[in-house]
Image (cartoon, rainbow, N blue to C red):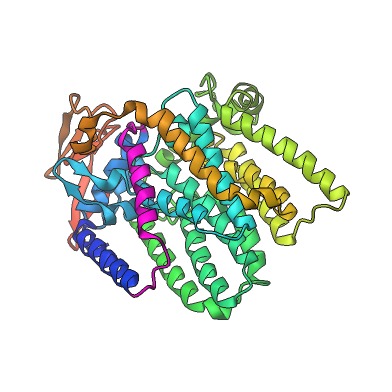
């Protein structure tokens, strides 16, 4: 807020290292450092050969630049509407970003969360619903990426980029995993610790993607059953304060309480033009509802005012997209088997699990109707079929699978197969001494103009890491000023 986040980066990383070493030597850190470092190395090896995606050079890197190098900017969305998004993920990247020569670790922060979540699949001796779910989720992801014909597949192609879709997927999977762990635990102390984590992950999930609101149904129900509010009042107060700061930052950046909802926008001189905001929100919907041919992209009647788009989308996108095909098959057979086992009374679905499935299903249906491009809901999409399979497998306590650590070995095997088949063929010995450097094309960079003493540039939809103020869609006029030493960008 009051200073560029780059000022805090080294301090936060140093404190994190000190606390980690202290906890390790005091035996308070109950993890295998060696195992965690090996996992980090494997995921770093994968990310080394990752490729630039489309959105990161378009606006992700510019958001991180503004957070890193500038304190709070009022009306930043007036410069480029995409800069108005207020995802905590970008703030986290900015806080952990360190540049070293031409290397920048902002491209690889997501590896920390990948490694942490994957570590959990190896850290459970007892087979539980949560461990089955997490093991199958990672196995699903690696197998899909392995058989995909293009590079790492549409999901893992984003690894090594500072984008949000991959993080949102990991966040949603960790949310379901944490929820399942809470319902399994009998020790109240351990349960309360996980409830605190659950609140944090849920808040991040909703701040990252408000459309996931339906997942809150199950947690609201838990509030009156499992969760003891009095025992968690401190974490609730802290998170409520953080949430208010998030709302304030959103107001400052775009003039709206929640950027993607025009009804929440306030009447200020830095509030983004509502017609511009509505146009781009509708554009996102039109694009995702016109996939894959985009023939209806400019037909607002079919894509916005009616549901005439759905038949074409279902036939040409849903039925031809590999992830939809795989999930539909898994859901069909798991549903048939689940219904059969329920009728035979060999399967019992707990009320919490039933609510969880209902909530994930509602999230998927909502996304399919509003923004049906699958990358917006990888997490719920994968979680729906995997949770159904996990709940069917778990009650049977298959001794053979437990005896040979099937649930721990499967994600390891699928990960190693992915590495050996997809990654190692790209390896060269010279890569061992070369830093992973991401290059961007700045050959189209040109000056738009100078406004109130500020130079504005553009670069053919590739602003990427350009240090100067850069926009993708130049305007005829920009209005810059300083108010109490804070930069204001007015809409007119």
**Residue 354 percent across, percent down from the top left:** 72, 55
Residue 333 as seen in the image, left or right of residue 199: right
The residue drawn where x is 45% and y is 38% is 416
**Residue 160 percent across, percent down from the top left:** 34, 39
Residue 467 seen anywhere in this rendered image of the structure: yes
Eyeballing the image, is 36 above or below 101?
A: below
Residue 483 as seen in the image, left or right of residue 359: left
Q: Image quadrant for the C terminus?
A: top left
Count of numbered marks: 0
Q: Residue furthest right?
A: 344
Comparing 192 with 452, the one in front is 192
Residue 234 as seen in the image, left or right of residue 132: left
Q: Residue furthest left?
A: 453
Image quadrant in which you'd find residue 475: top left
Q: Is residue 42 magenta?
A: yes
Q: Image quadrant for the N terminus?
A: bottom left
Q: Residue furthest bottom?
A: 230
**Residue 371 percent across, percent down from the top left:** 54, 37
The residue drawn where x is 36% and y is 30% is 424
Comparing 374 with 490, the one in front is 374
Q: Is residue 7 magenta?
A: no
Eyeballing the image, is 383 above or below 152?
A: below
Boundaries of the magenta span: 26-54
Comparing 210 with 318, the one in front is 318
Residue 287 seen anywhere in this rendered image of the structure: no
**Residue 253 percent across, percent down from the top left:** 33, 53
Eyeballing the image, is 251 above or below 228?
A: above
């Amino acid at each position: 807020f009051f200073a560029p986040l780059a000022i805090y980066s080294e301090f936060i990383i140093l404190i994190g290292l000190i606390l980690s070493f202290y906890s390790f030597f005091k035996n308070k850190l109950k993890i295998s450092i060696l195992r965690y470092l090996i996992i980090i190395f494997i995921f770093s090896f994968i990310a080394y050969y990752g490729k630039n995606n489309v959105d990161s050079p378009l606006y992700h890197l510019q958001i991180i630049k503004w957070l890193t190098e500038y304190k709070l900017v009022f009306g930043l969305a007036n410069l480029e509407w995409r800069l108005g998004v207020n995802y905590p993920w970008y703030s986290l990247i900015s806080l952990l970003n360190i540049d070293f020569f031409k290397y920048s670790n902002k491209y690889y922060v997501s590896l920390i969360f990948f490694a942490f979540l994957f570590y959990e699949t190896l850290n459970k001796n007892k087979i539980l619903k949560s461990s089955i779910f997490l093991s199958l989720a990672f196995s699903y992801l690696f197998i899909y990426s392995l058989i995909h014909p293009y590079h790492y597949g549409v999901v893992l192609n984003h690894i090594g980029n500072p984008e949000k879709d991959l993080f949102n997927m990991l966040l949603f999977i960790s949310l379901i995993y944490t929820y399942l762990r809470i319902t399994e635990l009998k020790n109240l102390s351990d349960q309360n610790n996980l409830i605190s984590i659950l609140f944090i992950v849920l808040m991040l999930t909703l701040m990252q993607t408000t459309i996931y609101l339906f997942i809150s149904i199950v947690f609201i129900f838990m509030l009156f059953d499992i969760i003891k509010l009095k025992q968690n009042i401190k974490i609730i107060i802290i998170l409520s304060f953080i949430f208010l700061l998030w709302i304030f930052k959103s107001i400052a950046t775009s003039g709206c309480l929640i950027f993607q909802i025009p009804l929440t926008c306030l009447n200020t001189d830095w509030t983004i033009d509502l017609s511009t905001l509505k146009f781009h929100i509708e554009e996102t919907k039109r694009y995702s509802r016109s996939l894959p041919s985009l023939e209806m992209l400019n037909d607002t009647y079919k894509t916005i005012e009616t549901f005439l788009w759905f038949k074409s989308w279902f036939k040409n996108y849903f039925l031809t997209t590999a992830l939809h095909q795989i999930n539909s098959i898994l859901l069909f057979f798991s549903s048939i088997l689940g219904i059969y086992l329920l009728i035979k009374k060999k399967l019992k679905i707990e009320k919490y699990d039933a609510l969880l499935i209902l909530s994930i299903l509602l999230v998927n249906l909502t996304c399919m109707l509003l923004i049906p491009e699958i990358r917006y809901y990888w997490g719920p999409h994968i979680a729906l079929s995997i949770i159904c399979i996990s709940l069917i497998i778990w009650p049977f306590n298959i001794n053979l699978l437990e005896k040979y650590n099937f649930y721990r070995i499967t994600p390891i095997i699928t990960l190693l197969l992915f590495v050996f088949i997809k990654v190692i063929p790209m390896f060269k010995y010279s890569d061992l001494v070369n830093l992973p450097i991401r290059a961007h094309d700045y050959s189209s960079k040109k000056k738009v103009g100078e406004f109130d003493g500020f130079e504005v540039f553009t670069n053919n939809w590739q602003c990427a890491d350009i240090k100067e103020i850069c926009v993708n869609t130049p305007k005829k006029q920009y209005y810059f000023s300083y108010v109490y030493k804070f930069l204001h960008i007015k809409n007119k």
